[in-house]
Image (tube, rainbow, N blue to C red):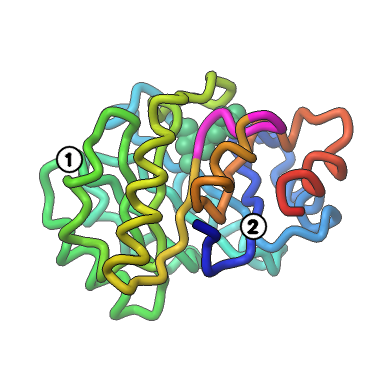
Amino acid sequence: MPSPHPTLLAPSILAGDHANLRSSLKTIEDAALEWVHLDIMDGHFVPNLSFGPQTIKAMRPDSTLFFDVHLMLDNPHLYIDAFLDAGAQQITIHVEPDYPVADTLAYIKSKGCKCGVVLNPDTPAEDAKEFLSACDIVLLMTVQPGFGGQSFRHDVLPKIEQFDRWRKELGLDYRLEIDGGVDLETAPLCTQRGADTLVAGTAFFKATDPAAFIQSVTA
Ligand code: DX5
Ligand code: ZN
């Protein structure tokens, strides 16, 4: 089913230049894109560390991009205020750890920030169904989170279709975002199934022709 939203490409700055994040933001802006995807890792929920709210806060005055913050944390509810204060405009939180997911979504929303849930590749769609009415976006991981540059998990494709079906059946209008291994070949597999928001790290920042990639993904 076609999504109710125009397709967006959200480059993940994880694959950018961490000694010069300003230049990576500019690369996104120069490509006339509107979102940047910010991957936050705690070294516990995922086996890697990235950066924190201080870095996002430092980037905020330099950019008009929409800050899409993906929290890969065991205790995301303890850090919401820090990311709101840093300038997040959307915060997505995983359903796998044990913390009050519904209350955290409500809190994010009460602060005027968009919110949504994230599912790992092996997490059943049903685990997120109860939260859907509170979500502006649902983020489906197509790699095990923690590292850029991994291969797209084709076995997640039916889950994209499931969330697209629920969006229609339940009369909701959340965005459907895909994260991990998105490239020229895998992007159409996602958009054909109702995805409208594509995160790309490696395929955007390491592309020989980023303009061609963007055009093919968002056409
Ligand atoms: C993985 C991150 C992704 C990752 C995507 O933990 O959530 O956003 O950076 O990178 P690529 O596009 O290289 O798979
Ligand atoms: Zn991400």
- The crowding category of the residue bearing disc 1, from other C-alpha atoms within 10 Å (few below 14, some 14 to 19, many at least 20), is some
Amino acid, disc 2: Leu
Q: In which quarter of the image is residue 107?
A: bottom left
Q: In which quarter of the image is residue 57?
A: bottom right
Q: What element carries label 1?
A: loop
Camera-side residue: 215 or 50? 215
Disc 1 C-beta below 8 A from ligand 1: no
Q: Name the residue under label 2.
A: 8
Position of 148 relative to 86 (above/below): above
Residue 184 within the magenta-colored segment of the rendering: yes
Camera-side residue: 15 or 203? 203
The residue under the point 53% across, 20% down is 150
Secondary structure mostly seen in magenta is loop
Number of the front mark, 2 or 1 = 2
Q: Is mark 2 on a helix, strand or loop?
A: strand
User: Does residue 27 appear to the left or right of 43 in the view shown?
Assistant: right
Q: What span is colored magenta in the figure?
A: 179-185
Amino acid, disc 1: Pro
